[in-house]
Amino acid sequence: MGTIRFTSIGPMTTDEKIFFQALGLRIAGLRKDLELTQQQLAELLGVSQQMVASYEVGRRRVPISLLPTLARVLATSMEGLIGEDSRRSGKRGPASKLQQQLDQVSQLPRAQQKFVSQMLDTVLQQASR
């Protein structure tokens, strides 16, 4: 009977690279929105600064076990962190243009999101008069 050995997973597939690069961009953006350094985030996660840097550029896979802590520390949902929009779950077909725009706005830095929100508030207030 052979011995079971746990080794690291092999090279990333193209789809994995795309996913982890997008995840890394979201992590970096959320971290910067919170004005955290990579070192500060690393300390909160219990990993090295180099590991955070590797996650942010998509060079390393973020362990599934780290996602809940990462979402909490970055003040987002798990869905928001991994790029899934829970509002569309269960719906079929392509997203509406408005939904696509909202998805794009959700990827902007918080200051720009606030600006867009204020603009929408103004338009909606004028429309309700």
Image (spheres, rainbow, N blue to C red):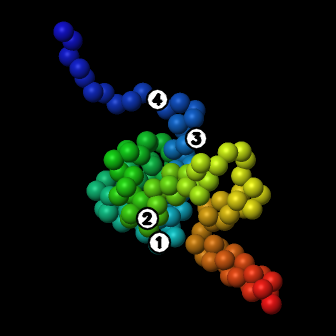
Q: Amino acid at mark 4?
A: Pro
Residue 33 location (% of width, % of height)? 52, 70
| Rendered residue at 45%/49% (across/down) | 55
Residue at which label 1 appears: 34
Give the vertical position of 77 relative to 13 (above or below). Answer: below
Give the vertical position of 57 relative to 4 (above or below). Answer: below
Q: Nearer the viewer, mark 1 or mark 2?
A: 2
Number of residues whose C-alpha sits closer than 10 Å to that of mark 4, classed few (under 14), some (14–19) or many (20 or more): few
Q: Is residue 49 visible?
A: no
Residue at which label 4 appears: 11
Number of residues whose C-alpha sits closer than 10 Å to that of mark 1, classed few (under 14), some (14–19) or many (20 or more): some
Name of the residue lying farthest toward the top: 1
Earlier-in-chain disc, 1 versus 2: 1
Q: Are marks 1 and 2 in contact (CB under 8 Å)?
A: yes
Residue 18's disc is 3
Q: Are marks 3 and 4 in contact (CB under 8 Å)?
A: no
Q: In this rendered view, identify the residue nearer to me: 45 or 122.
A: 122
- Tell me how far mark 3 sits from mark 1, CA to CA: 25 Å
